[in-house]
Image (cartoon, rainbow, N blue to C red):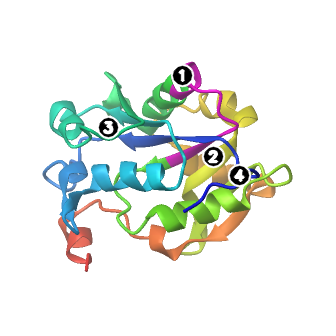
Amino acid sequence: MTLKKSDPRAGTVILAAGGSTRFGSPKQLLVHKGESLVRAAAKAAIAAHASPVIVVLGANRAQVAAELTRLRGVRTVVNEHWSTGLASSLAIGLRALMEISGCDAVLIMLADQPGVDAAALKKLITAFGQDHRIVASGYAGTVGVPAIFGCEHIKELMRITGDKGAGQWLRDHLDQVTTVPLPEAELDIDTTHDADQLG
């Protein structure tokens, strides 16, 4: 997959800090097609040329971090307050990305959407541009992540609080969002029943 000169310089934040309470074990470590979900998500971002990749860890941090070894361009940060919800992890990840990169845009991903591969991410990146500064995935009648945001929106995203993430922010700002159909993003792993749906 060749990065064109017109493509944005996009970094990635992957949210992987949750405690997987509904799943019963760390879902970031669930193996699908020979790889853990968190490692596959990081590799998809790298293959889509959306690096550096910041992976936000929290619960089970040592085990999750071990899945990311030897991946060039991937860095981890720890959210000590991961139990307060998605917003704190999002803010920590965005801050870390901005500290190490002069990206034009940030791709926000979850670690538990196994259908999202590099080709899916590239659809979002390709749609992003001067006239489309927020590009989100469309699936199941709504919009959500993965999504790519122009850097001018980062400070506002960092002000989100509680257990709300970028998905809720997108739904609150639909007039600014360009939607790309991405049905492969619909399945996110929250329960063992969800995992049973994996092919």
Q: Position of residue 108 (x, y in %)?
A: 53, 46
The single residue placed furthest to the right in the displayed view is 131
- The kind of residue on which mark 2 rests is Trp
Q: For the residues marked 3 and 1, what is the alpha-carbon distance in whole angstroms?
A: 20 Å
Q: For the residues marked 2 and 3, what is the alpha-carbon distance in whole angstroms?
A: 19 Å
Q: Name the residue tied to disc 1.
A: 100
Quarter of the image that includes the N terminus: bottom right
Q: Does the magenta stretch include residue 107?
A: yes
* Residue 7's disc number: 4
Disc 1: CA contacts within 10 A as few (<14), some (14-19) or many (>=20): few
Badge 2 element: helix
Q: Name the residue tied to disc 3.
A: 17
Badge 1 element: helix
State whether residue 139 is above or below residue 167: below
Badge 4 element: loop
Any part of residue 116 in sight: yes
Q: Name the residue tied to disc 2.
A: 169
Q: For the residues marked 4 and 1, what is the alpha-carbon distance in whole angstroms?
A: 20 Å
Q: Which residue is located at x 18 percent, y 35 percent?
A: 60
State whether residue 151 is above or below residue 193: above
What's drawn in magenta, residue-wise?
A: 97-108
Question: How many numbered marks are there?
Answer: 4
Does label 4 or label 2 sit earlier along the sequence?
A: 4
Q: Who is closer to the viewer here, 184 or 176?
A: 184
- The kind of residue on which mark 4 rests is Asp
